[in-house]
Amino acid sequence: MKKLKIFCFLLFFPIVIYAQLENTQLVITDGLSNAALKQKIESNISYFLIACNEAVISGKKPKFNKELTDGAMEDLKEMWKTSPMSCPVSKIEEICLETTEGRYQVRNVPITMMAADEGEREQELVFNLTPAGIIDGVSVAIEENKYKEIMAEHETVQDLFRRQVIVDFVENYRTSYNRKDLEYIESVFSDNALIITGKVIKVKPKSDHALRTLSHEKIVYQKRTKQQYLDNLKKIFAGNKYINVLFDEVEVIQHPKWTNIYGVTLKQEWHSNRYSDVGFIFLMIDFKDENHPLIQVRTWQPEKVDGKVLSRDEVFSLGDFNIASELMYD
């Protein structure tokens, strides 16, 4: 049994030794002047990572203590059911960000998702923490350079705040698929949300000339209600042990006139036991309630048609939708 454990460990962590995993440490290099709070956040995240590593090695569930809130604990249990995770490095040095209402965030913590496909296991986590330094949420991060780019494009203090909310929102939305969290997904969609999905179909040419000159594929769009979308997701979650969703090329744009409305465009890679695809997602998010932004529109389009990647002009954007009167306010 001992040899088997060592073999499995070496299979997944060829460059990391057991002693390193037992002593994984987070060091905050900047962003906190309160020494006691800094030490607490370092300790809580370090203990979290060590618990994950020990659980992967032993084949058991991680044993967390008081470093997580009850809500975060439940979310992590659901994530662990779909894929155990571990930290492949012994020391992490990162800054601590202060977000809203005295809360904190630590980004770019490397982890290995054990159930992900080869080449997609290495990802990064974002830790959201309470003012007291307790872990209140863990999400899979977007790329750091994209995060910095999104935040740097703010025009006002309110815009900066909303961009941080949107990044948190997008990262948690992505992670909700990992933990199969239908309740969260339901909570972020407006009851009257417009949901559009595109499907590529083959078009049978009507003549030899058409066969030579015309496209053989086209996108057919289908409109879904929020409930139809959730019912379909429920079936997908039930039929797949692990779902790995990757977001890339994230763009955030504020509506030029209705400044409470934002458009988020991103490329999504979807991988599950039974199905994989790549496509473009567009989300229209409104801030009628600053503390609870809602998705009013969600669209999905395939990345390619006839072997060609869709141009940005062909991807849905804010300009493709009329803004309902009840959303037109500042």
Image (cartoon, rainbow, N blue to C red):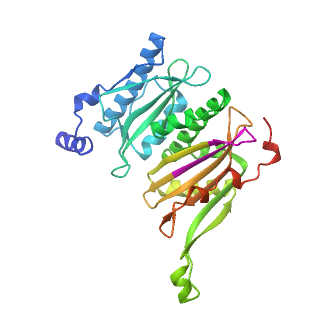
Q: Is residue 231 above or below residue 21?
A: below
In which quadrant is the N terminus drawn? top left
Closer to the camera in the image, 306 or 239: 306
**Residue 141 visible to an observer of this rendering:** no
Residue 209 on image: x %, y %? 55, 87
Q: Is residue 322 above or below residue 38?
A: below
Q: Residue furthest right?
A: 325
Residue 314 on image: x %, y %? 60, 60
User: Quick check: 326 left or right of 13?
Assistant: right
- Please give the name of the residue rendered at 47% of the width and 53% of the height, measured from the top-left corner: 269
Residue 230 on image: x %, y %? 62, 53
In which quadrant is the C terminus drawn? top right
**Residue 40 visible to an observer of this rendering:** yes
Closer to the camera in the image, 174 or 198: 198
Residue range corresponding to the magenta coloring: 253-267
Residue 200 on image: x %, y %? 55, 69
Give the quadrant of residue 28. top left
Q: Residue furthest left?
A: 3
User: Quick check: 14 left or right of 250?
Assistant: left
- Please give the name of the residue rendered at 55% of the width and 49% of the height, measured from the top-left corner: 266
Q: Is residue 120 magenta?
A: no
- Please give the name of the residue rendered at 36% of the width and 52% of the height, measured from the top-left corner: 117
Q: Is residue 258 magenta?
A: yes
- Please give the name of the residue rendered at 34% of the width and 28% of the height, measured from the top-left corner: 50
Closer to the camera in the image, 24 or 318: 318
